[in-house]
Amino acid sequence: MARQIAVLGQDDELLRSERQLRAEGFCWIAGVDEAGRGPLAGSVVAAAVILPADVESLPGVFDSKQLTEAEREELFEELHALPGIKISVASATAEEIDELNILRATHLAMRRAVAGLKEADFVLVDGLPVQFTLPSRNIIKGDAKSASIAAASIIAKVTRDREMLQYDAEYPQYGFARHKGYGTREHLDALKKFGPSPIHRKSFRPVYELLPDTPVQGTLDF
């Protein structure tokens, strides 16, 4: 079925934060979001996106969690094809997550993504505040309120899902293609049967329970 999400005009409500910041004198506003805080395996991926202000309409981006996989894939391709868009993607590995904890690793991935956009002069970030070298503003549920953050949400989610598909070919016994590393019953059963893989987060329960010498962080329910 065709996607029913309309294109966005530059006067759309989802671009209000970007318009306000341009009125304040900022030119290159980067929206930032992440994907993969909750899974038991794989990296956490962040994307930073600067949407062009000089095109009449933009892809109808919206919170990636509210879209189907097919809709995200379609929007991912539309965003990459958009003239003038700036996109940067970065990640923090499972090893970095274990070393730093998931919150710090997520912020590290976000800062890496923003660092890849040399033009950026302001950052809009989803959720709670993150420390950047640039001026920034956090927006709670920003992926549903800011087009730039929503675009970053889609880019990060599709990028991470594709990464997990690659890991599925390398470690087919875990079913990463289906659950993307989240703690489903299938995944937990595979963990008990085969033990953790090199991409599992060894400080997360229940991975930790199979490696009792590893410091525990627990899991996140999202």
Image (cartoon, rainbow, N blue to C red):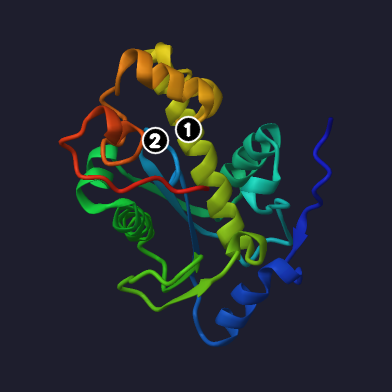
Residue at the image point whose x is 29% and y is 32% from the top? 209
Residue at the image point whose x is 40% and y is 66% from the top? 119
- Residue located farthest toward the left when viewing the structure as drawn: 213
Q: Left or right: where does residue 99 sit relative to residue 200?
A: left
Residue bearing mark 1: 183
The answer to whether residue 114 is visible is yes
| Position of 50 relative to 61 (above/below) | below
Q: Tell me the amino acid under the disc marked 1.
A: Gly
Q: Left or right: where does residue 94 sit relative to residue 29?
A: left
The answer to whether residue 52 is visible is no
Q: Position of residue 140 (x, y in %)?
A: 57, 69
Q: Tell me the amino acid under the disc marked 2.
A: Leu
| Mark closest to the chain's N terminus, 1 or 2 | 2
Q: Position of residue 63 (x, y in %)?
A: 65, 53
Q: Left or right: where does residue 214 sit relative to residue 127?
A: left
Residue at the image point whose x is 15% and y is 36% from the top? 213
The CA distance from mark 1 to mark 2 is 6 Å
Work out whether residue 35 or residue 213 is closer to the camera in this orientation and state it.
213
Q: Left or right: where does residue 108 sit relative to residue 212?
A: right
Residue bearing mark 2: 40
Q: Which quadrant holds residue 129?
A: bottom left
